[in-house]
Image (spheres, rainbow, N blue to C red):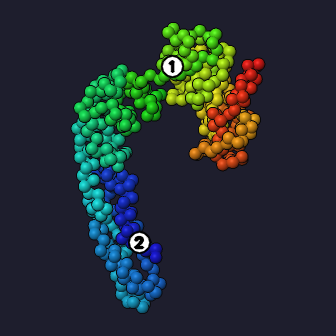
Amino acid sequence: MSWTTAADLRAQVQRWWDRGDLLRATVTDALAWPMRLNLKVPGAADLSDRFEAVRDWVRELADVPQVRIEWRQWNHRVQGMQRLPAAVWIDSLQDALTLIGKARHAQGFEALWQQTVVAQPALLAWLSRRPLQALELADRWERLLAVVAWVQAHPRPGVYLRQVDVPGVDSKFIEVHRGVLAELLDLSLPFEAVQTEASGIAQFARRFGFLDKPVRIRFRLLDPALPSLPGCEGLPDITLDAASFAALTLPVERVFITENETNFLAFPAVASAIVVFGAGYGWEALSRAAWLHRCRLHYWGDIDTHGFAILDRLRAYFPGAASFLMDRETLLAHRLHWGAEPESARHDLSGLTPEEASVYDELRFDRHQPRLRLEQERVGFEWLNERLRRISEL
């Protein structure tokens, strides 16, 4: 049966709610009432062949509250004069809200709107754009407005989030709500108070002028002849903040980057070289070190689609970076150690060399096996040493 049911009518009104239309209509003239609902009705053959079903259908629609039915008379040749629904209307916003049980929620949104009119009128545009999300945040909205007001009073404050002094707000609250706060602050702060090139939740602090915890870079000296840092004599494993790492003047010719801590710790000795542990920070932190751009960089990641995607992103900062042990020869030589990555990347990568792109295509198109991965720590240690001997001769 394709006739519109009572559930179908409610579903139509529910879609208005799910789009945010009904909430917007509580505070604006977003909808013009009455609103007509879609209605599919029985045909003449249904009246003849399924008369009882049609009569039940009419009763069901007539019992739906908060809708107005427009009727028509139909003189059927067998059943005689019949009164059937021709159109169904919702006459008011209140009727629509009551029909789907959302009247109380709408009142809550209206209260949020009025609160924002007084406290932060610039944010009404956000409420209108994201009314359902606003409802989800109703119990936190007052605190979110308070954070916005604090940042307005202290633009680009140069302090840690922990130092924001707002009643009922701690740094955890701000961190959890960075996404929505970023949208609210973008609307409420002057242009010069927002560093627009810093985007995404991870760069919230930088975008709005807060201090961020320093990125720390861990590296090992692979050549005992390299001068150590003051106070670090005899300690090859060193961790520095990004600014201190950028200020180094080590006489280094090669830099290896590996994503696996065991590989980092066990990396063999190499003349005039260091190895960097790549986990825990983005490539931007490394790119600030001008001396690093003068070195020969070798990136060692897993041979899987995501490993090549990381290599592709690295080359946005270091175009001359070379892959290390991420070639077809290494992949095929370690067939006994093949595994599977949870989910493969499928998009094109423009930063790969032709050889790398060929291996990447074999992986993303499952030419060897589905979701193939060779994890970097499964590469044989003698294989690693042999490859290091090869590149040292270049």
Q: CA distance from mark 2 to mark 1?
A: 68 Å
Of tags 2 and 1, the one toward the viewer is 1
Tell me the residue that label 1 is attached to. Answer: 239
Find residue 361 and report its image quarter: top right
Viewer-proximal residue among 4 and 268: 268
Report if residue 350 is visible in the image: no
Q: Which mark is residue 165?
A: none
Could you tell me which residue is drawn at 64 percent across and 14 percent down? 223
* Residue 21 x %, y %: 35, 53
**Direction from residue 312 to residue 77 in the image, left or right:** left
Looking at the picture, does residue 299 appear above or below residue 17?
A: above
Could you tell me which residue is drawn at 35 percent across and 78 percent down? 58
Could you tell me which residue is drawn at 37 percent across and 37 percent down? 176
Could you tell me which residue is drawn at 44 percent across and 22 percent down? 214
Viewer-proximal residue among 392 and 27: 392
Q: Secondary structure at mark 2?
A: loop
Tell me the residue that label 2 is attached to. Answer: 4
- Say which label, 2 or 1, has the lower sequence index: 2
**Direction from residue 291 to residue 74 in the image, left or right:** left
Looking at the picture, does residue 154 appear above or below residue 139?
A: above
Report if residue 54 is visible in the image: yes
* Residue 359 x %, y %: 71, 39
Q: Secondary structure at mark 1?
A: strand
